[in-house]
Image (spheres, grey):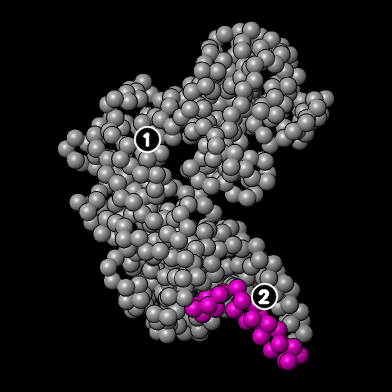
């Protein structure tokens, strides 16, 4: 199609509405399509699409698509073939096409349908090229600038109609610069999605593993070859939908998949944990690339293995003996907090390899560093200051403790009539308060204490995975025969003693500690802080408050059976 004349081609302007979630949780709720030819609008079509997960209140208000509307809507498998037929032999046009194409490709994959892979033209790119003075390129704003009336927004067909009219308004300028469809895509800088290599064709339906036994539940699945060797381990909040999507992805391992095993969990976190452990145990070839999740969470950590330790910001907790605070969201904000702590407590601002100096650094000259680089400072003096800073985050909220510490320093400076220092500390406190309000996540050392976390089922009320976290590690999780109170007491024994400065993480435990910490910080599930006085009565009140129902599922026992 790239060699066909642009002026005589047919186009389909498409718009999609979704449930407002990102990644694998994003589901299509409505499609609108308008056929365009010769610079004019022709046939129109739209349809609501059924979803697996309930819609949030915000997205219902934003789009006007209610839960009852999608409950009565046809399934994606019934809607998407109509769109595929409409796109064949035509060019897809969309406003911010990258988003719509990603949503559609994901929906086609979930429905186990072939994506027609049409050429794509983006009206945002057209506006950038042919209406450069229009700096705001939202669909309604751009349409108004081109003299196009917009009656309704945030519904698929009206937005697709507006997109088609914007395309027609700029179509003449595009034809004047691009004789063919391929030339238009090149001029606009639209990146054609690369097709799968011809050596990895999609496997025919009749030759695929039988997936009908997989439930619409969260959990983990393992694809195996004819000899029972694991090929790929995956997780999802909907096992059947996710497993089917692999056979339209072009992955090479799908050609050898003959069987699939699965383990149901009660929550997404349970599925994440089980997937991580199974990948480490089985080392399937399909998972060699691993997963990178740029979720924005980082840790403020201090490795206690050198004479003058430093505070640093890193993506993961530290291996070995260390204090790790987090996870917190925002590397820049975390780095600024480290600088604030260094100045308040006179800690090193340099890296782990401390340079030797003949004269104090700029921070040392301002009195904001103890200057151990001069080689005349007792390590115990430095360590006392470091311990003061780190203890703010051990066993309590670091935000409140840090502000209280600065308030004490302000009072001490005022009492000693050091008013300039008191004023400096007051400015520092105001900046810290603003910084802490902006910094999301958990400002507490991860090795502190033990917790019982109830990771909820994605859709069923009252269903949870009980997960015990102690010393930053998952020490127990899933359904079992023993009582929850007994398991809580065992988890408490696995945690470092209260007030201990520093915990220990092995290299194998770091990835899991980050996975669990980031999920808890993002989802804020019900949590019970464990202690010697937290007994059966406290557990019962905590569980009943959240409507907990214990389902005797696979849990930790499923890990051993599936891995075997």
Q: Quadrant of residue 494?
A: bottom left
Please state which of residues 307 and 423 is positioned toward the viewer in this rendering.
423
Separation (CA) of disc 2 from disc 1:
63 Å
Across the whole image, how many numbered discs are drawn on residues? 2
Q: Is residue 404 above or below residue 297?
A: below
Q: Which residue is mark 1?
A: 244
Which residues are the magenta region?
391-417
* Residue 305 sits above or below residue 206 on the image: below
Q: Position of residue 364 (x, y in %)?
A: 62, 75
- Residue at the extreme left of the image, as rendered: 227
Label 2, residues with CA under 10 Å away: few <14, some 14-19, many ≥20: few
Disc 1 on helix, strand or loop?
Answer: helix
Q: Choose the circle earlier in sequence order: 2 or 1.
A: 1
Main secondary structure type of the part rendered in magenta: helix
Q: x and y percent of residue 469 in the render? A: 39, 68
Between 519 and 57, the residue placed more toward the observer is 57
Q: Which mark is residue 366?
A: 2
- Residue drawn 61% across and 10% down? 9
């Amino acid at each position: 199609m790239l060699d066909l004349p642009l002026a005589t081609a047919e186009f389909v302007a498409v718009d999609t509405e979704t449930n407002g979630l990102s990644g694998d949780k994003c589901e299509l709720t409505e499609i609108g399509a308008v056929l365009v030819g010769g610079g004019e609008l022709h046939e129109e079509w739209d349809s609501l699409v059924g979803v697996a997960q309930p819609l949030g209140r915000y997205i219902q208000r934003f789009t006007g698509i209610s839960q009852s509307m999608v409950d009565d809507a046809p399934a994606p498998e019934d809607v998407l073939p109509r769109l595929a037929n409409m796109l064949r032999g035509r060019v897809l046009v969309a406003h911010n096409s990258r988003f719509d194409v990603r949503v559609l490709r994901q929906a086609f994959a979930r429905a186990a349908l072939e994506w027609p892979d049409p050429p794509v033209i983006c009206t945002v790119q057209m506006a950038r090229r042919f209406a450069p003075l229009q700096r705001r390129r939202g669909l309604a704003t751009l349409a108004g600038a081109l003299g196009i009336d917009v009656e309704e927004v945030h519904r698929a067909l009206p937005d697709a109609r507006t997109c088609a009219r914007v395309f027609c308004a700029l179509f003449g300028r595009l034809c004047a610069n691009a004789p063919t469809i391929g030339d238009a895509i090149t001029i606009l800088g639209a990146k054609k999605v690369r097709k799968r290599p011809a050596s990895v064709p999609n496997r025919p339906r009749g030759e695929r593993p039988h997936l009908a036994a997989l439930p619409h539940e969260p959990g983990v699945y393992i694809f195996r070859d004819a000899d029972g060797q694991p090929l790929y381990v995956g997780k999802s909040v909907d096992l059947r939908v996710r497993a089917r999507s692999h056979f339209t992805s072009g992955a090479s391992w799908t050609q050898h998949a003959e069987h699939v095993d699965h383990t149901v969990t009660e929550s997404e976190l349970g599925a994440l944990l089980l997937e991580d452990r199974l990948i480490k145990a089985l080392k399937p070839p399909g998972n060699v690339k691993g997963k990178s999740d740029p979720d924005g969470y980082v840790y403020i950590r201090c490795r206690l293995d050198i004479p003058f330790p430093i505070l640093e910001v890193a993506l993961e907790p530290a291996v070995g003996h260390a204090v790790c605070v987090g996870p917190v969201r925002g590397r820049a904000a975390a780095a600024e907090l480290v600088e604030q702590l260094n100045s308040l407590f006179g800690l090193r601002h340099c890296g782990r390899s401390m340079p030797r100096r003949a004269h104090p650094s700029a921070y040392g000259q301002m009195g904001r560093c103890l200057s151990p680089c001069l080689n005349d400072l007792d390590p115990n003096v430095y360590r006392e200051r470091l311990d003061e800073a780190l203890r703010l985050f051990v066993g309590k909220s670091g935000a409140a403790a840090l502000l209280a510490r600065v308030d004490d320093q302000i009072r001490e400076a005022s009492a000693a009539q050091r008013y300039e220092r008191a004023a400096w500390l007051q400015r520092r406190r105001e900046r810290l308060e603003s910084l802490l309000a902006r910094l999301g996540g958990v400002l507490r050392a991860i090795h502190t204490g033990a917790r019982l976390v109830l990771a909820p089922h994605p859709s069923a009320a009252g269903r949870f995975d009980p997960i015990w976290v102690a010393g930053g590690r998952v020490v127990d999780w899933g359904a079992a025969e023993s009582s929850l109170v007994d398991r809580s007491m065992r988890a408490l024994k696995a945690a470092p003693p209260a007030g201990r400065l520093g915990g220990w993480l092995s290299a194998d435990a770091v990835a899991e500690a980050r996975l669990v910490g980031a999920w808890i910080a993002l989802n804020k599930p019900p949590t019970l802080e464990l202690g010697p006085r937290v007994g059966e009565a406290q557990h019962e009140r905590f569980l009943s408050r959240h409507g907990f129902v214990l389902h005797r599922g696979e849990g930790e026992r499923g890990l051993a059976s599936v891995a075997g």
